Image (cartoon, rainbow, N blue to C red):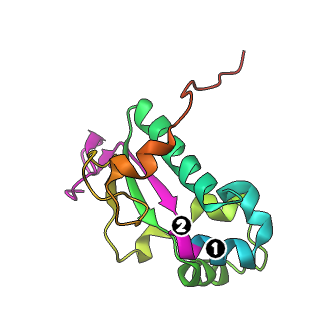
Amino acid sequence: MSEAGWSPAGSDGTYRYATAALSVFWPEEEFRILVARWPHLAAHVGATWDEHRRRVERHCALLEQEGLRVQQLPGDVPGFVTFLAARKVTKPGDDDLNIYPDLRAVTIPMTAWPPTRTAPCWCGSGRKYKQCCRRHGLGTLVIDTLT
């Protein structure tokens, strides 16, 4: 596990374990295709592109607040279809989105989150992070706890 972004958290003498979390985001065009094909998934990924970006940004911030290093990976509908077919799923649900992708088949590099303020935004807009998703604000990052 020497890949950038995956920090060792422990070892059992055989394996080194990392404290990193994966956040899958859907680039704008892929998001539109995903929601058009499976409208019921909008409840999980967001009904609009801006809502999706806010959810991803919040998710990453909450993971980081818990001490995890966050790696982002763009989702793609053809890859999701292949993933579903391998699992014999015809109508995907939240669980399918939560376990997508099969990391054994990922060939594109992951991106560390958060980007610096002046780095290109993670969403693929081509704008600087500070002028794009960072501007949308995260609201309150208080983690709800059960009492």
Q: Which residue is mark 2?
A: 26
Identify the magenta region: 1-30
Q: Position of residue 96 (x, y in %)?
A: 66, 65
Task: Name the residue rendered at 42%, 53% in the picture.
Answer: 132
Quarter of the view holding residue 13: top left
- Crowd rating for badge 1 (residues with CA inside 10 Å; few <14, some 14–19, many 20+): some
- Residue type at the position of mark 2: Trp
In the image, is residue 3 above or below residue 39? above
Decide if residue 86 is on the left or right side of residue 59: right
Q: Pick out the residue farthest to the front.
A: 131
Q: Is residue 89 visible?
A: no
Point out residue 7 in the picture as x, y percentages from the top left corner.
Answer: 25, 45
Residue 109: say if magenta.
Answer: no
Q: Residue 14 in magenta?
A: yes
- Residue picked out by circle 1: 32
The amino acid beneath tag 1 is Arg
Q: Is residue 44 left or right of residue 13?
A: right
Q: Assign a secondary structure to mark 1.
A: helix
**Quarter of the figure that contains the N terminus:** bottom left
Q: Residue at x 75, y 74 (%)?
A: 38
- 28 vs 20, nearest the viewer: 28
Q: Is residue 136 visible?
A: yes
Q: In the image, what residue occupies the spot 79% across and 75% down? A: 91
- Residue at 56%, 75% in the rendered image: 30
Residue 25: image location, x then y, percent: 51, 61
